[in-house]
Amino acid sequence: MIITSLDQLDLNGNYTYADYLLWKFEERVELLRGKIRKMGAPSRKHQEIVTGLTRLFANALWKTPCKVYVAPFDVRLTRTREDKDAVTVVQPDLCVICDTAKLDARGCNGAPDLIIEILSPGNSRTEMKDKFELYQEAGVLEYWVVSPIEKTIQVWKLNEQGIYIGLQPKVEGDIATTPIIPNLEVDVTEVFMD
């Protein structure tokens, strides 16, 4: 059954990607372990940061097999490659996918190599705990959490045991880099310029 209003759903219910595909309403949502999470409209500052980072990443990835995508872009995180098993569908602010076999017409099926989430008032718990756990479990190699209020970038790298190790936060004056994109240099001061 096609769902045209979020009010038609039980917000405490459990859903799959197959259900998600039937939702035709205006509100933006994600599925975190089968639970609906409403997404608010991003602030102007949030969008400026996303735009600046996207430009830097796109330039660094030019003529490489890796691709950069920005929300709204569905990333299905499953334990198998079967869509019907997906109970987690996220829309990261920015993600980099180097294995193009994970890309299809609907987005990404599997863990991106790198995900960036930008904190907004009210979403810190989701980004810092819930998505941290999901991305670690799914095998996202790097997870960057950008804080516009603190003007920091916290980088988490997946170790050989599948556990995130936090690096020293990058602050204004620092340059953020990643081995996933060797020629990328992110000047933290420029990320937060008004």
Image (cartoon, rainbow, N blue to C red):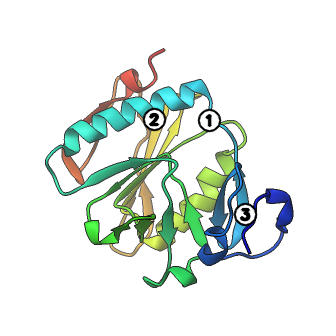
The answer to whether residue 142 is visible is yes
* SS type, badge 1: loop
Q: On the rendered structure, is 117 left or right of 127? A: left
| Spatial CA span between label 3 and label 2 | 24 Å
The amino acid sitting under disc 3 is Ile
The amino acid sitting under disc 1 is Pro
Q: Quadrant of residue 50?
A: top left
Q: Are marks 2 and 1 in contact (CB under 8 Å)?
A: yes
Provide residue 145's location: percent of width, then percent of height.
50, 45
- Mark 1 Cα-neighbour bin, 10 Å: few <14, some 14–19, many ≥20: few
Residue 60 bears which disc, if any?
none
Residue 42 bears which disc, if any?
1
Residue positioned most to the left:
63
Q: On the rendered structure, is 145 left or right of 34? A: left
- Mark 2 Cα-neighbour bin, 10 Å: few <14, some 14–19, many ≥20: many
| Spatial CA span between label 2 and label 1 | 10 Å
Circle 3 residue:
36
Q: Residue at x 56, y 83 (%)?
A: 84
Residue positioned most to the top:
194
Q: Residue at x 58, y 59 (%)?
A: 131
Position of 49 relative to 93 (above/below): above
**Which label's residue is closer to the chain start, 3 or 2?**
3
Circle 2 residue:
50
Provide residue 165's location: percent of width, then percent of height.
42, 59
Q: Residue at x 65, y 65 (%)?
A: 31
Q: On the rendered structure, is 182 left or right of 89? A: left
Position of 15 relative to 49 (above/below): below
**Which label's residue is closer to the chain start, 2 or 1?**
1
* SS type, badge 3: strand
Q: Residue at x 29, y 34 (%)?
A: 56
